[in-house]
Amino acid sequence: MGWLGRFTTAVAFLAIGVIFSPETFGSKSTALSTYLKLAHLLSFSTAFGAALWVTFIGGIIMFKNLPRHQFGNLQSKMFPAYFSMVGVCGAISVASFGYLHPWKTSSTAEKYQLGFLLSHFAFNLTNLFVFTPMTIEMMKQRHKVERENNIGEEVGWSKNVEVAKTNPKLAAMNKKFGMIHGLSSLANIMSFGSLAIHSWIPVFSSSASYLFYCQVKQSLAMQFVKCTINALQRLGSPRKNDLQWTHNVIILFT
């Protein structure tokens, strides 16, 4: 099935969803409310599904089966598109959910739901504009060093680890790459977790376990900010505003 067929199928299912939505048959909700609910559902589910696949399934399968340089080059093209798509979906989710649940009239659970959507959006933006460009740049530098040592076309890390034991330049590059890549992965996990909790809040919003989770999440967010700033300072971030921008965005939304 070509892209036109897939697009037509998607539009058909979207139309069926709108036509047979309960709101279409006499609910008090307005037509705009109906479409906003649909927009929130589609954007949220798209972001959640994409994050689940890329984080826990697709990336692992590719790493275990592709030559490492080929895998890295593919990731350098895929991740900017992935974070851009998830960012757009996050923006749509925030806008539609915020419109449907105005802050002044929202319940506590709905306010937390909006907060977690904003948290997801913030972590995703940080990855898109800070961590991903730095990770790709460091990856290219490390690929250059590895090609000089005739490694990188194998599957897995074995040859890199062996050569790094006798090559200080490669060892230092591995350390820098691991640090920024780790922060990028952590931001992605926090973003995915925020989406997951957004969908679970109505189930346990009044429970003590949920309140405990909120406290833990806030503490983790603060530690994430501190680790990010320390890492960027140690790496010598090429962008003057990276430190302040990262700090402000994450603090604002968490």
Image (cartoon, rainbow, N blue to C red):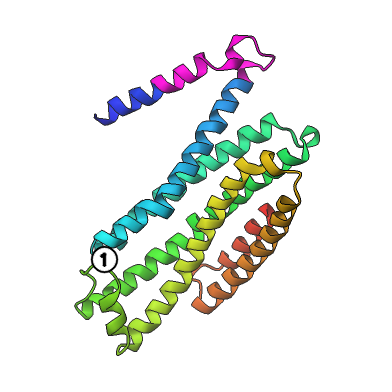
Assess disc 1: are there few (<14), some (14-19) or many (≥20) residues with their C-alpha within 10 Å of its C-alpha: many
Residue 43 in the image: state x and y as whole percent. Answer: 51, 36
Q: Is residue 14 highlighted in magenta?
A: yes
Could you tell me the amino acid type at mark 1? His
24 w.r.t. 214: above or below: above
Q: Please tell me whether mark 1 sits on a helix, a strand or a loop.
A: helix
Q: Is residue 251 highlighted in magenta?
A: no
Residue furthest to the top: 26
**Foreground residue among 97 and 129:** 97
For the C terminus, the image quarter is bottom right
Q: Residue at x 73, y 40 (%)?
A: 109
Residue furthest to the bottom: 166
Residue 149's quadrant in the figure? Answer: bottom left
Residue furthest to the right: 104
Q: Residue at x 46, y 48 (%)?
A: 51
Residue 244 in the image: state x and y as whole percent. Answer: 63, 65
Q: Is residue 31 visible?
A: yes
70 w.r.t. 121: above or below: below
For the N terminus, the image quarter is top left
Residue 223 in the image: state x and y as whole percent. Answer: 64, 68
199 w.r.t. 174: above or below: above
Residue assigned mark 1 = 69
Exactly how many numbered labels are in the figure?
1
Residue 54 in the image: state x and y as whole percent. Answer: 40, 51
Q: Is residue 126 visible?
A: no
Specify the segment rendered in magenta. Answer: 12-32
Residue 136's quadrant in the figure? Answer: bottom left
Is most of the magenta stretch helix, strand or loop? Answer: helix
Q: Residue at x 64, y 9 (%)?
A: 26
